[in-house]
Structures are given as C-alpha cells and as structure tokens.
Amino acid sequence: MGIELNRRCKFNIILILIERVNMDLKALKSRHQELEGIIQTSYQNYVPDLRVRRYKKEKLRIKQLLEKEEKAA
C-alpha cells in the first residue's frame, strides 16, 4: 500500500511539474505520440494493467493540456 501511494504521489508531482513548466506545444504533442506507442507496445507485450493505466493517465492529462492550449489560442 505504501509503495503504491508513493508511486501515485510521484506521478502527481510529475503532472504538476509539467503544468508549472508549461512545456511548449511541440514537446507536449511529441510526448503524447510517444505515450501512444508505449501503450500499444505494452498491450502487445502483456504489461500489467497498473503500469498501462499510469501511461494512459499521463496521456489523458497531456491531451487535456493540449486542448486547453488550443482553446486559449
């Protein structure tokens, strides 16, 4: 339980840092594409669902940031 909580905290910190640093649009799009490849490869190689879920959450968060940037522009 403690290890899983620690991983969640680290993941949330990474997401906060991504927002604060405000990565440029090109970097966000490239990370989004990279995550798509990671997720596809994970499914093909039977990676545990918990790990895939982490990548999918990061991908979704980046997608939300991209949509937010597009609306602002």
Image (cartoon, rainbow, N blue to C red):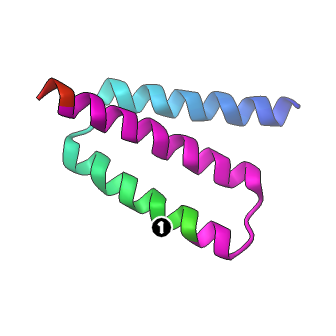
Name the residue type under label 1. Answer: Gly
Q: Quadrant of residue 63?
A: top left
Please tell me which residue is depicted at 34% across the width and 24% down the height of the picture.
20
In this view, which residue lies farthest toward the right? Answer: 1
Residue 50 shows in this picture: yes
Please tell me which residue is depicted at 41% across the width and 61% down the height of the picture.
34
Above or below, comparing residue 11 to residue 41 in the picture = above
Where, quadrant-wise, is the C terminus in this rendering?
top left
Residue 22 shows in this picture: no
- Is residue 69 shown in magenta? yes
Local crowd at mark 1 within 10 Å, few (<14), some, or many (≥20)? Answer: few
Please tell me which residue is depicted at 57% across the width and 28% down the height of the picture.
12
Please tell me which residue is depicted at 63% across the width and 45% down the height of the picture.
54
Where, quadrant-wise, is the N terminus in this rendering?
top right
Is residue 60 toward the left or the right of residue 30 in the image?
right
Q: What secondary structure characterizes most of the magenta part?
A: helix
Task: Pick the residue in front: 28 or 21.
Answer: 28
- Is residue 23 shown in magenta? no
Q: SS for tag 1?
A: helix
* Residue 5 picture location, percent across and down: 77, 29
* Residue 55 picture location, percent across and down: 57, 50
* Residue 50 picture location, percent across and down: 74, 49
In the picture of the structure, the residue carrying the numbered disc 1 is: 37
Task: Pick the residue in front: 13 or 38.
Answer: 38
Q: How many marks?
A: 1
Q: Quadrant of residue 19?
A: top left
Q: Quadrant of residue 65?
A: top left
* Residue 31 picture location, percent across and down: 37, 53
Query: Bounds of the magenta span?
Result: 41-70
